[in-house]
Image: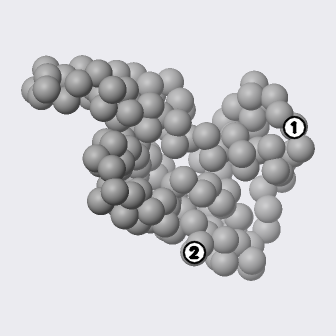
Amino acid sequence: MLPKTHVIAGIILSFAIFLLWPAIGLFYLLIFFFSSIFIDFDHYLYFILAKNDFSLAHAYKWFVAKRDFIRSLPLSKKAKYQHAVLIFHGIELWVIVLLLSFIHPMFVYVLFGITIHMFFDFIEIIYYKNPIYSKISQIYVYFSNKNKKPLPF
């Protein structure tokens, strides 16, 4: 999903959480909100490593072009291309944050924020018939990319 969609969803859900549970407090509400959005920072890191370019605008355009290219392919050809290894978009991060939540309650809200983010990503993946493993395990994505060709970008 595009960042704008995550921001809108984050605002709506943060407002709903505050209405239902005002005792949460502003700090934890902001932790939830920002973690539901800034999980996408890994897209920018991936772009920097792939293109050696620090322009946020270039990164956004590059990922939109990649997304549009993949969406234009028939289902049989989508599986032939590599997926981006996005270190914050896999079960690996969830496990780390879950373990950290036993240390500090702030991480419960981080976990909730990334769960909401990933929920919307899964909806998009299912809608566009992309492989769901691309957002389940980044270790699996890394190893499955070995026999696939990179996108022409």
Q: Residues within 10 Å of mark 2 (few under 14, many from 20)?
A: some
Q: Which mark is residue 140?
A: 2
Q: Position of residue 9 (x, y in %)?
A: 35, 28
Dot 1 falls on a residue whose secondary structure is loop
For label 1, the residue is 53
The residue shown at (67%, 36%) is 64
Considering every residue shown, the one lying at the far right of the view is 52
Q: Residue furthest left?
A: 20
Residue, far front: 103
As drawn, 153 above or below 93: above
* Apparent side of residue 60 relative to residue 88 in the rendered image (left or right): right
Give the residue type that dot 2 points to. Tyr
Of 61 and 51, the residue lying toward us: 51
Q: Nearer the viewer, residue 74 or 67?
A: 67
Q: Quadrant of residue 69?
A: top right
Say if 72 sits above or below 60 in the image: below
- Counting every numbered tag in the picture gives 2
- Point out which mark residue 90 bears: none
Q: Which residue is located at x 66 percent, y 71 percent?
A: 142
Is residue 60 positioned above or below 69 on the image?
above
Give amino acid for label 1: Asp
The residue carrying pointer 1 sits among few (fewer than 14), some (14 to 19) or many (20 or more) residues within 10 Å by Cα, namely few
Point out the tag, 1 or 2, that comes first from the N-terminus. 1
Q: Is residue 20 left or right of residue 119?
A: left
**Residue 89, can we see it?**
yes
53 left or right, relative to 100: right
